[in-house]
Image (tube, helix red, strand yellow):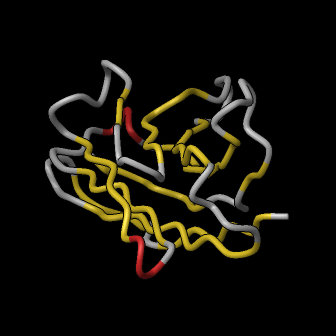
Amino acid sequence: QVQLVESGGGLVQAGGSLRLSCAASGRTISSYVMGWFRQAPGNEREFVAAIRWSGGSAYSADSVKGRFTISRDNAKNTVYLQMNSLKPEDTAVYYCAARLVIHREYDYWGQGTQVTVSS
C-alpha cells in the first residue's frame, strides 16, 4: 500500500503561482512513477505531469508545459507541482497518484486538493 496526501491548493488570481505537495508513505516508492492529474467540474480527469521516482525523468501535458514543473524530494518522500502563470482554466481538483513503473494504470490516488484561479 502507498498512501498519498496532497496539500497546497487554494485560491489565486490569474497570473499567480501555487505549489502543490504530495507526501507519500508506505511501500518503498523508488519503483514508482508519481503523477499529477486534475479534474474540473463536468470534465474528465486529465493528466498534468509525472516523474519517475528513481532517476527523476519527468514529462508534462502540453497545456501546462513552460508553466508547471514537477519535482521530487527523496529525503521527504514528497512530490511537488510548481504552478506558475496560472489561468482560470487551470481551476480543478488536483490529484496525486502513484503507479509501479511496470504498470500502465495508476495504482494509488490521493484525496485531491482544490485549485481555484480567479480572473
Question: Where is 104 relative to 48, above or below?
Answer: above
Question: Where is 13 relative to 2, above or below?
Answer: above
Residue depicted at 68% across the width and 75% down the height = 25
Q: Nearer the viewer, residue 108 or 112?
A: 108
The answer to which image quadrant residue 33 occupies is top right
Expressed as whole percent of the image width and height from the top left, the position of residue 112 reads 65, 58
Residue depicted at 68% across the width and 67% down the height = 28
Expressed as whole percent of the image width and height from the top left, the position of residue 47 reads 53, 29
Residue depicted at 75% across the width and 68% down the height = 27
The answer to which image quadrant residue 38 occupies is top right
Horizontal side of 29 relative to 27 (left or right) equals: left
Question: Where is 13 relative to 68, above or below?
Answer: below
Expressed as whole percent of the image width and height from the top left, the position of residue 23 reads 56, 73
Residue depicted at 15% across the width and 33% down the height = 66
Considering every residue shown, the one lying at the far right of the view is 1
Q: State the quadrant of the C terminus.
A: top left
Question: Where is 23 relative to 64, above or below?
Answer: below
Horizontal side of 105 relative to 96 (left or right) equals: right
Expressed as whole percent of the image width and height from the top left, the position of residue 107 reads 79, 43
Q: State the quadrant of the N terminus.
A: bottom right
